[in-house]
Amino acid sequence: MAAAAARHSTLDFLLSAPADCNAVLKGLQPVFQEQGMTETIHNWEDHGYLATYINKNGSFSNLRIYPHGLVLVDLQSHSDDIKGRDEIDHLLNKIEERMKELFHSSIKRVKRLPATVRGGAIDRYWPTADGRLVEYDIDEVVYDEESPYQNIKILHSKQFGNILILSGDVNLAESDLAYTQAIMGSGKEDFTGKEVLILGGGDGGILYEIVKLKPKMVTM
């Protein structure tokens, strides 16, 4: 049986005023102690605290408290079953409740992102050309080979169908047909017998669809 992937959960608090680092630490310590987690604390005087809490099952949490009012909780575990995820959610809920009890008047923002799964059998995270990270609902690796020129992957997504990824860059998906049809005018334009110029044809999707409409000539 393959080892469970690591789940990385985050919980952030932005305070409207400088944080009393010691008060935050003392206030959250009982929450971690209730879980039977052992504690290690680093204090950098003017730079706040870093507290690490380790569980017997190997999961751990980092609590970083910055004096200017930023409190970060990072929790990593390797259990991917429902019980393990429920335990993580329970701990994060308790931390959030405790922080609101202690600093309700000075909490400007609370942010909890969906857990990222690291080291899983299927990689669901792929960067965009402008540096953003997108998580796809990928459930199958259809094809994965190294050609003389690049790595070629075809991954299946429930939402987008098969997705072509070349050397880590998402190129196209079966769901792109709607985008192609929109560029072509969504059926409002008659291409029959006309000369058509395609500037920047990319993967050839427009060319593939437009020749079905019986143009006289297509230049891409």
Image (spheres, rainbow, N blue to C red):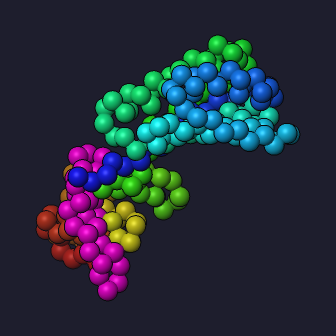
Residue occupying image coordinates x 33% and y 66%:
165
Visible in this render: residue 182?
no
Of the pair 213 and 83, the residue shown nearer to us: 83
Q: Quadrant of residue 200?
A: bottom left
Total numbered badges shown on the rendered structure? 0
Of the pair 3 and 140, the residue shown nearer to us: 3
Task: Classify the position of the C terminus by image quarter.
Answer: bottom left
**Percent from the top left, x then y, of residue 213?**
15, 63
Task: Check if residue 151 falls in the magenta segment.
Answer: yes
Residue 99 vertical position relative to residue 88 in the rendered view, above or below = above
Residue 55 vertical position relative to residue 212 in the rendered view, above or below = above
Residue occupying image coordinates x 81% and y 43%:
44
Visible in this render: residue 111?
yes
**Residue extending furthest bottom?**
148
Residue 22 vertical position relative to residue 52 in the rendered view, above or below = above
Prevailing secondary structure of the magenta residues: strand
Seen in the image, is 215 located left or right of residue 57?
left
Residue occupying image coordinates x 13% and y 65%:
212
Query: Which range of residues does the magenta coloring cover?
Result: 136-164
Residue occupying image coordinates x 37% and y 33%:
84
Task: Check if residue 157 falls in the magenta segment.
Answer: yes
**Percent from the top left, x then y, of residue 106?**
73, 19
**Percent from the top left, x then y, of residue 19?**
78, 28
Seen in the image, is 2 located left or right of residue 44?
left
Seen in the image, is 126 located left or right of residue 22?
left
**Residue extending furthest right?**
46
**Percent from the top left, x then y, of residue 22?**
77, 27
